Amino acid sequence: AADQGNAGAQTYLGYMYNKGQGVPQDYAEAVKWYRKAADQGHAAGLNNLGVVYFNGKAFRKIMYERKLVQPRRFTLERY
């Protein structure tokens, strides 16, 4: 159903990827499915996409996997 454009199914599939329920946890896949639902104006898809971005999980993980940023290393010497 998600592949056929059902926004509710897309949101739920995004949730499954976000939480790793029944599929490997993959924030990039979650964002992909949430965005498809959000593009159709689906309220839960819009909300979940916003929450993922607000929490920063998707952004940090995707950027790190694409080697666009390095993980932050904090030391006491910096403070």
Image (spheres, rainbow, N blue to C red):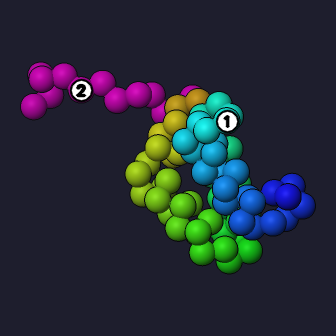
Any mark on residue 54, and which?
Answer: none
Image coords of residue 65 (percent x, y): 59, 30
Quarter location, residue 3: bottom right
Q: Secondary structure at mark 1?
A: loop
Residue 74: mark: 2
Figure check: 33 above or below 70: below
Residue drawn 58% across and 69% down? 44
Residue for badge 1: 22
Is residue 42 in view?
Answer: yes
Q: Is residue 14 magenta?
A: no
- Which quarter of the rendered picture does the C terminus lie within? top left
Percent from the top left, x then y, of residue 67? 57, 29
Residue under the point 65% across and 51% down = 14
Q: Which stretch appears magenta? A: 66-79
Q: Amino acid at mark 1?
A: Gly
Q: Which amino acid type corresponds to the residue marked 2 in the rendered image?
A: Phe
| Near-viewer residue (39 or 10) | 10
Point 60% across, 51% down: residue: 15
Whether residue 68 appears in this view of the structure is: no
Left or right of 47, for residue 42: right
Q: Is the residue marked by circle 1 packed among few (<14), some (14-19), or many (20+) residues within 10 Å?
A: few
In the rendered structure, the answer to whether residue 41 lies left or right of residue 74 reads right
Q: Are marks 2 and 1 in contact (CB under 8 Å)?
A: no
